[in-house]
Image (tube, rainbow, N blue to C red):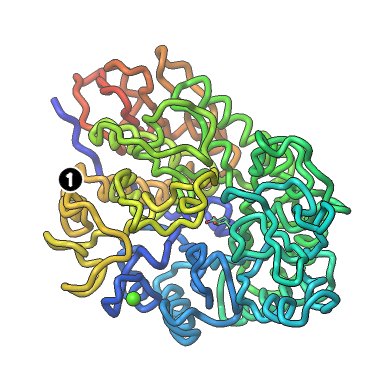
C-alpha cells in the first residue's frame, strides 16, 4: 500500500514575534528572474514572481545585494550603499518590490555589507587619488609594507579568496582586503565608518525593509596592530579557532548600537548575522537580547547525515541559543556552499566552505536532500531556504571555466572557489533555456543544464510527490500547526538504529512527530498517528510504515 498525504490542518498559529519561527527564502537576485532579457535577474523580475513565493508559503525573503557595484564579487562589493545597480533596477523598483511583498504578507530582508566596500566606492577612490596621508585612507586599512623597500605585505594574513590579504598601490602603500582586492576592508575604528552605516541602516529602514542580513558580521573589528597570525598557510579564516581579524569582542558594541536603531522602527525589524565564529557559544553572543536577532547556524549546515551527528548538533544548537533567549536558525544551502542535494552525499562530513562540488547520483542526492529539508523544517526556530532548493536543483558541477564568475575561482587557491554551481538561474517553465528565467530568446548569465526542463516550477506545480509540492505541503503544515511554533518543545523519542525521531508538544502533550530514516536500509516503524507528510513514497500496513532509506515523515499524534 502507498500512503496518501492528508491535507494540512487549518489551525492558526498563535501570534508570536514573526521572526522567531519564520521561514526565510533567500533570493539571489541575479539568478532568480530576469525581466528584460539581458540574462541577469533583476528587481522587476522578483516582483513578478512574488505570488509564487506567497504560494510556496514562506514568511520573508532575504535578497542578496542589489546595490551599485562593479560586480567583482557578485554585488558583495558595493560602490554605493544607497542606490540600486542599473543591472538590477532602481531605488523605485526596490520600493515597489518592498510594497508588493508587504501586500502579500511577505517581509523583506536586505543584505548589508559592512566589512568592506568596493574599490570603486567614493571613499576608496579618494583614498587612492589623494595618496598617503589622505584622511580617506584612515577609513580603510592602509599600511606601509615590510622589507627593505616595503615590498612585502604588512602582515601574513591570507585572503579568503586566495593569495595575500594585501594589495600594494602605486604609491607603495598596501591596503587590506580579506576577500578580493576589489573589496577593501573598512576600518571600523573610524567614527565616520560607524556613522555612515547607521545612516545606511536608516535609509533602508525608511524605505520599509523588515531587516538586514549582515555580511561577514564577525569581521568588522580587527585586532589592534593587525598582528601576524604566524601559521598562515594552514589557516582557515572562517570560524576555525582564534583569529586576529574575526570574531573580536569589539564587534558587539557595533551591534548593540544597530539594535537600538532597529528597535526605533515599528514592526520588529530584524538583523541576522553571517558570523562564522569558532563555537556555537560564540555565535550566540551575536544574538544576545540587545544585539542582533538571529545568526546563521553554519555548524548545522556542515553536519554529517547520521543520527548521532545530527542529534548532537540539534541539541547543541538549541542549547547554545537558549542561553541568550534567541531562536535557533537552520539552513542547508545558500549562495556560498554546494547545494545540499549534492553536499549531503559527498564524502567528508564537517567542512563546508572549501568543499569542491562533485557529481553524485542525482536520484540519491535528491532523496537525501528532501529528507534533510523535511527534517530541518520540523525543527524549532527559524529556517532559511535558498532559491531552487524547493525545486530540488542539483549543484551544477560541470560549468566550463570560461563562464565562471566567482572571483575565488579565478584566484585559484581560494577556499570558496567553487560557488558558481549553486548560482545557476532558476528554471520556471518551458522546454528550452532560459526556461522562463527571462524572456524567450534571452540568455542566462550562467548556462542552465538541459535536464532542468523537468525541474522547472511549471513542471512540478500540482504534481503529487514533486519537490515543489513537498515544500509547499511542509510549509503549510508548519504554518497551520501550533506545535511547530514554539522554539523550546522538542523531545527525542526512542527509534530503531539509524532512525532519528523527535516530537513537538503543546502544553506538554506531544502532538507532532518527525521520523527520519538515515540507516541506509528500509525500516518499519509503528504509526504513532496520522501521516501528515512524507519526503518519499512509503510502503506499509495499517499498523506499520516502511520508510525507505533517506526518508522523513511527519505525523500528527492523536490521544
Ligand atoms: C559572504 C557572502 O555570502 C559571500 O558571497 C561573499 O563573497 C563574502 N561574504 C564577501 O562579502
Ligand atoms: Ca535583467
| Residue 43 versus residue 75 in the image, above or below | below
Residue 180: image x %, image y %? 59, 59
Rendered-image quadrant of the C terminus = top left
Is residue 423 found left or right of 114 in the rendered image? left
Ligand 2 picture quarter: bottom left
The residue tagged 1 is: 464
Q: Nearer the viewer, residue 336 or 286?
A: 336
| Residue 82 versus residue 446 in the image, above or below | below
**Residue 512 in view of the camera:** yes
- What is the crowding at mark 1: few (fewer than 14 residues within 10 Å), some, or many (at least 20)? few
Q: Nearer the viewer, residue 501 or 72?
A: 72
Q: Nearer the viewer, residue 421 or 312?
A: 421
Q: Which residue is at the far right?
A: 224
| Residue 281 versus residue 215 in the image, above or below | above
Residue 278: image x %, image y %? 69, 37
Q: Report helix, strand or loop for mark 1.
A: loop
At 19% from the left and 19% from the top, the residue drawn is 541
**Residue 187 in view of the camera:** no
Q: Quadrant of residue 366?
A: top left
Residue 479: image x %, image y %? 42, 52
Instruction: Find out if the beta carbon at label 1 lies less than 8 Å from the nearest ligand 2 atom.
Output: no
Amino acid at each position: 500500500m502507498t500512503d496518501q498525504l492528508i491535507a494540512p490542518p487549518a489551525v492558526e498559529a498563535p501570534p508570536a514575534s514573526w521572526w522567531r519561527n519564520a521561514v526565510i527564502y533567500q533570493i539571489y537576485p541575479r539568478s532568480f528572474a530576469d525581466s528584460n532579457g539581458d540574462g541577469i535577474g533583476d528587481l522587476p523580475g522578483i516582483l513578478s514572481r512574488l505570488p509564487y513565493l506567497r504560494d510556496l508559503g514562506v514568511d520573508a525573503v532575504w535578497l542578496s545585494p542589489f546595490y551599485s557595484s562593479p560586480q567583482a564579487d557578485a554585488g558583495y562589493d558595493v560602490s554605493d550603499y544607497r542606490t540600486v545597480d542599473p543591472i538590477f533596477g532602481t531605488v523605485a523598483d526596490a520600493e515597489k518590490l518592498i510594497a508588493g511583498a508587504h501586500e502579500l504578507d511577505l517581509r523583506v530582508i536586505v543584505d548589508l555589507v559592512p566589512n568592506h566596500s568596493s574599490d570603486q566606492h567614493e571613499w576608496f577612490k579618494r583614498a587612492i587619488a589623494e595618496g598617503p596621508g589622505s584622511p580617506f585612507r584612515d577609513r580603510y586599512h592602509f599600511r606601509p609594507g615590510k622589507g627593505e623597500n616595503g615590498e612585502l605585505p604588512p602582515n601574513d594574513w591570507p585572503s579568503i579568496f586566495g593569495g595575500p590579504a594585501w594589495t600594494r598601490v602605486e604609491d607603495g602603500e598596501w591596503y587590506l582586503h580579506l576577500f578580493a582586492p576589489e573589496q577593501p576592508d573598512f576600518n571600523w575604528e573610524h567614527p565616520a565608518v560607524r556613522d555612515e552605516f547607521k545612516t545606511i541602516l536608516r535609509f533602508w529602514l525608511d524605505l520599509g525593509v523588515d531587516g538586514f542580513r549582515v555580511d561577514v558580521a564577525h569581521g568588522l573589528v580587527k585586532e589592534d596592530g593587525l598582528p601576524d597570525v604566524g601559521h598562515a598557510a594552514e589557516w582557515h579564516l572562517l570560524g576555525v579557532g582564534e583569529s586576529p581579524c574575526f570574531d573580536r569582542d569589539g564587534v558587539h558594541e557595533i551591534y548593540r548600537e544597530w539594535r537600538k536603531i532597529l528597535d526605533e522602527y515599528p514592526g520588529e525589524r530584524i538583523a541576522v548575522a553571517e558570523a562564522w565564529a569558532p563555537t556555537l557559544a560564540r555565535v550566540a553572543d551575536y544574538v544576545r537580547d540587545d544585539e542582533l536577532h538571529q545568526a546563521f547556524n553554519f555548524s548545522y549546515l556542515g553536519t554529517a547525515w547520521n543520527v548521532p551527528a545530527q542529534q548532537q548538533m540539534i541539541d547543541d544548537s538549541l542549547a547554545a541559543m537558549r542561553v541568550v533567549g534567541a531562536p535557533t536558525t537552520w539552513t542547508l544551502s545558500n549562495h556560498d556552499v554546494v547545494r545540499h542535494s549534492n553536499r549531503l552525499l559527498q564524502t567528508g562530513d564537517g567542512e563546508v566552505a572549501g568543499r569542491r562540488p562533485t557529481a553524485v547520483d542525482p536520484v540519491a542526492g535528491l532523496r537525501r536532500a528532501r529528507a534533510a529539508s523535511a527534517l530541518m523544517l520540523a525543527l524549532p526556530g527559524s529556517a532559511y531556504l535558498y532559491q531552487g532548493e524547493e525545486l530540488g536543483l542539483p549543484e551544477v558541477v560541470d560549468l566550463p571555466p570560461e563562464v565562471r564568475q566567482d572571483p575565488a575561482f579565478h584566484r585559484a587557491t581560494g577556499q570558496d572557489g567553487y560557488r558558481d554551481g549553486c548560482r545557476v538561474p532558476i528554471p520556471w517553465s518551458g522546454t528550452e533555456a532560459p526556461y522562463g528565467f527571462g524572456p524567450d530568446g534571452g540568455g542566462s548569465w550562467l548556462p542552465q543544464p538541459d535536464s532542468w526542463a523537468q525541474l522547472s516550477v511549471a513542471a512540478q506545480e500540482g504534481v503529487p510527490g514533486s519537490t515543489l509540492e513537498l515544500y509547499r505541503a511542509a510549509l503549510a503544515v508548519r504554518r497551520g500547526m501550533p506545535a511547530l511554533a514554539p522554539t523550546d518543545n522538542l523531545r527525542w523519542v526512542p527509534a530503531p538504529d539509524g532512525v532519528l525521531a523527535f516530537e513537538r508538544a503543546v502544553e506538554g502533550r506531544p502532538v507532532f512527530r518527525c521520523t527520519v530514516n538515515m540507516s541506509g536500509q528500509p525500516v518499519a516503524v509503528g504509526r504513532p498517528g496520522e501521516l501528515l507528510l512524507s519526503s518519499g513514497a512509503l510502503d506499509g500496513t495499517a499498523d506499520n510504515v516502511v520508510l525507505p532509506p533517506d526518508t522523513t515523515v511527519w505525523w500528527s499524534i492523536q490521544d
